[in-house]
Amino acid sequence: MDRLGERAPVMAPDAMLPLIARVARRVRELPDTWTLDLVAADGGPLMRYAPGQFTMMYAFGVGEIPVSVSGDAADQTRLVQTVRAVGKVSEAVTRLAAGDTLGLRGPYGTAWPVAEGYGRDVVVVAGGLGLAPLRPALYQLQAERKRFGKLVLLYGTRRPEDILFRRQLANWRRQLDMEIEVTVDHAGAAWRGHVGVVTRLIPRLGIDVDNAMALVCGPEVMMRFAASALNDIGVPEEAIHLSLERNMKCAVGLCGHCQFAGSFVCKDGAVMRYDKVRRLLGLKEI
Amino acid sequence: MEGLERIVSEHRLFQGLGPEFVNLAAGCAKNVRFNADQYLFHAEEPADWIYLIRHGQVALEVATPGRGAAQFETLGEGDIVGLTWLLPPYRWGYDARATELVRAIALDAKCLRDKCEVDHDLGYALLKRFLPVLVQRLQAMRLQLLDVYGSAG
Ligand SMILES: Cc1cc2nc3c(=O)[nH]c(=O)nc-3n(C[C@H](O)[C@H](O)[C@H](O)COP(=O)(O)OP(=O)(O)OC[C@H]3O[C@@H](n4cnc5c(N)ncnc54)[C@H](O)[C@@H]3O)c2cc1C
Ligand code: FES
C-alpha cells in the first residue's frame, strides 16, 4: 500500500494495551479547552513520542478519543495534551482534576518531519485548536533554531479571546527569532492585529519558496485553502505537510474506522504530505 | 520617471502597465497619510478615492449598534482599500480606519472612471487587475463565513 506519511520513529511495545496515567496538572487555556500534564500512575516512564503523534485517551467508563500531543518532546518526563470539550468523552477528559487517572494508548501515527526543514525556511500555519498539535514541532524548531532559515508562524482563529497559548505566543514573539502573525476572523475596534482568514497572510510571506517547508494543522477546510495558497506562491506540494483528523477506534490499523482512500489515518497519518492527499481533501465521501 | 509615477508603476495593481497607462493613472493620484485611528472613509459616503497602501494597516469595520465597531478585515502594505469605486452608486459600504500611521497613494476614483470611459484599453487593463483582488477577497470572505473554528479544529 502507498504510504502517505513518514512512519513515526517510536511506537509503544504493545500498541493496544492502555497505560494508567495520572493528571499531574490541569490548565484552563480557553473556557472549553484544557491542557493536561500526564505522568505514569505507577511513577515509571510513560511513553516516548515524537512531535505530531497522538494518543488514545480513555476516560474510564465513558470512552476513548484520539488527542495529539501538545508538549515538548524533549521533556519526556510528562505527556502534555490539550483537549477541547466538544462531546461526551472530551468533556469527561477535560473534567479530570489533578490526581485523577485515565487510560492512555500510544503514541500513534506519523510525526511532523521537522528535520526535513534543515537548511530551509519553515512556515507553520495553524488554525484554531490546530496550534496544539503543532506546538511540539515549534518547540523543536526553536531548540534547533540555527539549523533552519527563516521561521514563520501564521495563526488564525475566530476572535481575539479564542487565541490559544496566548502568553507563550507573546513570549516567543519577544524572545525568538521567529516571525509570528496572528489573525482573527472577527474583532472589536480595540484589536490591533490582523483580521481576516489566515490564508490571506500567505501571499505576503517573504520566504524562499523553492527551499521551504510548511507544516499545516487546523480544520480541514482551512488546511485545504492554506495548502493551496502555499502551493500557489510556489511552495512545492511535497514540501507541505498536513495533519488530518478522522474518526478512530483501534488507532493501530485494524478496524478501518479511519480509512482515507487507500490509507489509514491512524497509521499512515495523521501527518501526511499534501501531494499524496490533495485530490482527496475536497471529497465529501471520504 | 517622476516620484509619484514611479510609486504608482511599482504597485502590483499597475505593474506591467505601459508608461502611457501609468502616466494616465498617476494623473489621478496623490500621496496621503493618516494617523492612527483616523478614518479613510465612512460607510455611505461617496466612493471618491481608492487607496493603495504603502505603509501601515487599515481596518475595515462595520458599526454594530450597542457594540461599537466590528472589524472584519485588515489590509496592509501593497493592498488596495476600496473596491466599489467602479460600480454605481459609487458609495462605500463600510468604514476604513487607520490602526497605525498609514501612508498611501490616493487615486481620484472619478478621474480614473472618466479616463477608463474615454480609454477602454486602460479600463480593461485596470479591470483585469481589480478582478483578481475582488475574487481573492470573496474567497477569503467565504471561508470566514464558514466559521470553521466555531466548533471544530
Ligand atoms: C489524529 C487526531 C488528533 C486529534 N487531536 C486533538 C487534540 O489535540 N485536541 C482535541 O481537543 N481534539 C483532538 N482531536 C479530536 C478529538 O478526537 C475529538 O474531538 C473527539 O474524538 C470527540 O469525541 P467526543 O466523544 O468528545 O465527542 P462526540 O460525542 O464524538 O462528538 C461531539 C461533537 O463533536 C464533533 N466532533 C467529533 N470529532 C471531532 C473532531 N475531530 N473535531 C471536531 N469536532 C469533532 C462531532 O461532530 C459532534 O458534533 C483529534 C482527532 C484526531 C483524529
Ligand atoms: S482507527 Fe482502526 S484502522 Fe485506524
Image (cartoon, rainbow, N blue to C red):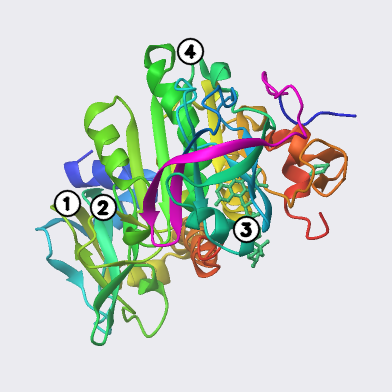
Q: Secondary structure at mark 4?
A: loop
Instruction: Give the CA separation, mark 1 to mark 3.
Output: 52 Å
Amino acid type assigned to the residue bearing label 2 in the image: Ile
Kindly indicate whether the residues beneath marks 2 and 1 are on one polypeptide chain: yes
The residue sitting at 59% across, 48% down in the picture is A223
**Is B105 on the left or on the right of A38, as rendered?**
left
Q: Secondary structure at mark 1?
A: strand
Q: Which residue is mark 4?
A: A119
- The label shown at residue B103 is 1
Amino acid type assigned to the residue bearing label 1 in the image: Arg
Q: Give yes or no for contact between labels 1 and 3 (Cβ–Cβ under 8 Å).
A: no
Amino acid type assigned to the residue bearing label 4 in the image: Gly
- Badge nearest the viewer, 1 or 4: 4
Residue B14 in sight: no
Q: Residue A46 location, x and y as percent?
A: 57, 27
Q: Which residue is mark 3?
A: A89
Q: Chain of mark 4?
A: A
Q: Residue B134 location, x and y as percent?
A: 48, 63
Which range is magenta? A7-36
| Mark 3 Cα-neighbour bin, 10 Å: few <14, some 14–19, many ≥20 | some
Q: Secondary structure at mark 3?
A: helix
